[in-house]
Amino acid sequence: MKRLKSLSILLLVWVMTACVVWEPVVYDELEQEAVSSAINSFKTEPRLDSFFETALAYAVFPGTYRAGAGFGAAYGQGWLFENSEVVGRAMLTELFVGANFGAQGYRKIIFFAEEWPLDQFKRGRFEFTGQANATIATVGKNKTPSYNPGVAIFIQVKGGLIVEASVGAQRYDFFPIPEGHAFVAD
């Protein structure tokens, strides 16, 4: 038991200090295809029309995965768009604890309506906590509370089997695309 507790603490420290692999930020054809597919999927939801029209920016995570059994973790990689241009890559890491069991894959979009939360996101100071989630195959309900004003988050379940009511910490890290390497969204 003591060993499990030590391992859990070590894992928590590792994830929350954003020990990520530093690799070049490249928005290649494979990434573009996954992101375009996710954006098109979100655009089929009429309730999101006003968000796409009015948001200053949005971050799209085409593939995020979470798993847990008492303790759990999630990881995803996405891209931030401003004025229909990709401006950088975002990485999501999360640790949570509570009543949870299973695994799930989903896509996520975060809309930024104000400068302040967008700036915090770009600085890697953007965090959420709390999760209520139930998924069986591709039919699911997910409620992630947003404690930050000027931000809206929507999730589309891709598949899995998970039941959860947990709390934890979710962190986003941002890696800008170098100057002169802008990409335009489809």
Image (tube, rainbow, N blue to C red):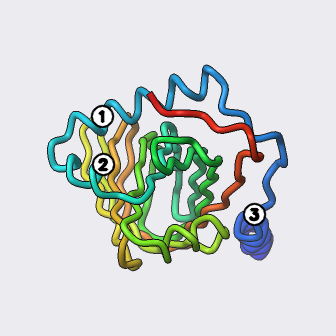
Q: Secondary structure at mark 3?
A: loop
Q: Is residue 145 above or below residue 31?
A: below
Give residue 93's quadrant in the image.
Answer: bottom right
Which numbered dot is residue 18?
A: 3
Q: Are marks 3 and 1 in contact (CB under 8 Å)?
A: no
Q: Check disc 2: other Cα within 10 Å, few if <14, some if 14-19, many if 20+.
A: some
Q: Find the distance from the CA under tag 3 to the CA under tag 1.
A: 30 Å
Which numbered dot is residue 52?
A: 2
Q: Is residue 115 left or right of residue 178?
A: left
The residue at 45%/56% (across/down) is: 57
Q: Check disc 1: other Cα within 10 Å, few if <14, some if 14-19, many if 20+.
A: some
Sequence-wise, the earlier of marks 3 and 1 is: 3
- Type of amino acid at the residue the image marks with label 2: Phe
- Total tally of numbered discs in the picture: 3
Sequence-wise, the earlier of marks 3 and 2 is: 3
Q: Find the distance from the CA under tag 3 to the CA under tag 2.
A: 29 Å
On-image quarter of the C terminus? top left
Location of residue 65 in the rendering, given as x and y in whole percent from the top left corner: 53, 44
Which numbered dot is residue 8?
A: none
Give residue 25's quadrant in the image.
Answer: top right
Mark 1 lies on residue: 138
For discs 2 and 1, the disc positioned in front in the rendered view: 2
Location of residue 158 in the rendering, given as x and y in whole percent from the top left corner: 37, 35
